[in-house]
Amino acid sequence: MRYILALLLLIQGVLMSAELHFLDLNGTKVPMIYEEDTTLPIVSMQVVFQKSGSIEDGKLPGLAKMSARMLSQGTKSLGNVGFAQKLEDKAIRFGVHTGTETMVMELSSLKDQFRYGVELVSKLFVEPNLTPETLQKVKTNTLGYLARKKDDYDYIASVNLKKLLFAGTPLQNPSDGTKESIEKITLKDIEDFLAKHLVRARAVVVIGGDLSLDEAKKIAKKMLEPLQKGELEPLPFYEASDKQQTKIQKEEQTQQAYIYFGAPYHERVHSDDLYLGKVAMFILGSGGFGSRLMEEIRVKRGLAYSAYAFSRVNKSHSYFTGYLQTKIESQEEAKKLVAKVIDEFVKKGATQKELESAKKFILGSEPLRNETLPQRLSRAFHEFYAGRPLGYSKKELELISKVTLEQLNHFIKSHPEITKLSYSIVTK
């Protein structure tokens, strides 16, 4: 108990250092998460654009990622090479990437070079390198990437599972797009996507390092100055299917069966009992060798080298999922065993020993997830994005430390929907 209290005090000191402020940009309030850290003369910043990821692809899967890749190609006046050279000369790291819900611009450097980096990167909002030649280059690279994925059976099984769980929604499409959709994307599609999504109304600034709050505000305003006001529409929520379907794709080259499974999970980002879900999923499938699935599938029966299961809880969707690889001749046995383990877990719950082991690991490993400034800023952003106060993760750890077996098993038994499994299998 003394160890846990000391640990929680340490985490409290780390997590409470991030602060939430709001920038006023011509009447638009832009959230800014800030943390001062003078350990090293480094500054790090992210500009996160909400509702700007692959969920916004529309009829062109891959559009958000293609737009991000185009934005990474520098400015028209400097070109990709010239832009990259200027960044390299000052040892500035820059990148643009997308998730399901967001597009993120990242910038970090030594403190002395950071303002230069902001001035350079902010020009991307004014004159991005949107030319036919650049688009063709990005398309070629993307199509090459997709061609290589044809032999990635984990990727294939994962994409097919999403098609089963989220059929008829934007989430059914691969975020990387398909050969057909990438070939259809035009320069105007990219221009329209960036014009709609790179706006102040969607922006959240996450900044920290060796700079004062006033400096952070000035830098953030400089970065966002070229942007239009724009709009942020509500993010829709999509339920995962409970139809318990199976899709099998035959591939002659594979030597194993790749089994991906998924089901609904009736939790939302603002749910008060997500901490119980974290403990439950650790015990069931995300805790490595100590998990139920690993114990039953690998240790007792030797059906797979590894087996995992976990929950994905996002603003736009949540679901339960997992995967394993097994011998071709063992795929049916493994599939049935997955269903049996999950069904028994929901009906009978966890044991006291499993609960104590999960608590010990989760509480003991938490400081490792908050060692660096980027980790702490990322944690603070996700708290804000989920509608939580900054520092909520500390409260969550306190709740986990006090979880009783009765509480946990009541939670587990209240989620029978995770037994409504669909399977995506790639096999010979």
Image (cartoon, rainbow, N blue to C red):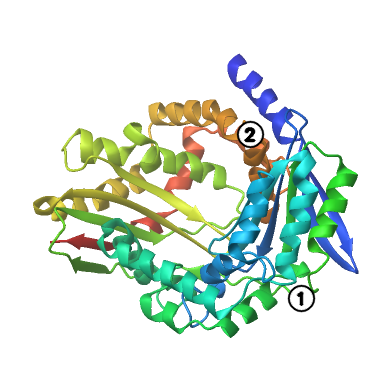
Q: Is residue 354 above or below residue 222?
A: above
**Is any part of residue 402 visible from this angle?**
no
Q: Amino acid at mark 1?
A: Gly
> Image quarter for residue 35?
top right
In which quadrant of the rendered view does residue 316 lie?
bottom right
Q: Quick check: 128 left or right of 220?
A: left
Q: Who's the residue at 62% across and 49% down the image?
A: 272
| Separation of residues labelled 1 and 2 (CA atoms) | 34 Å
- Residue 203 occupies which quadrant of the picture? bottom right
**Residue ID at (59%, 28%):** 367
| The C terminus: image quadrant | bottom left
Q: Is residue 242 left or right of residue 139?
A: left
Q: Mark 2, residues whose alpha carbon is within 10 Å: few (<14), some, or many (≥20)? A: few
**Residue at screen point 54% across, 61% down:** 99
Residue 230 numbered tag: 1
N-terminal-most mark, 1 or 2: 1
What residue do we see at 59% from left, 78% from top? 131
In this view, which residue lies farthest toward the top? 2
**Number of other residues with Cα within 10 Å of mark 1, as a class: few under 14, some 14 to 19, many 20 or more:** some
Q: Farthest residue toward the left? A: 329
Which of 404 and 190 lies nearest the eye of the viewer?
190
Residue under pointer 2: 372
User: Where residue 312 sits: x, y (%)?
Assistant: 48, 54
Q: Closer to the camera, 361 or 420?
A: 361
Residue 3 pos. (x, y %): 59, 16
Q: Position of residue 315 (x, y in %)?
A: 59, 62
Quadrant where the N terminus lies? top right
Label 1 residue SS: loop
Q: Secondary structure at mark 2?
A: loop
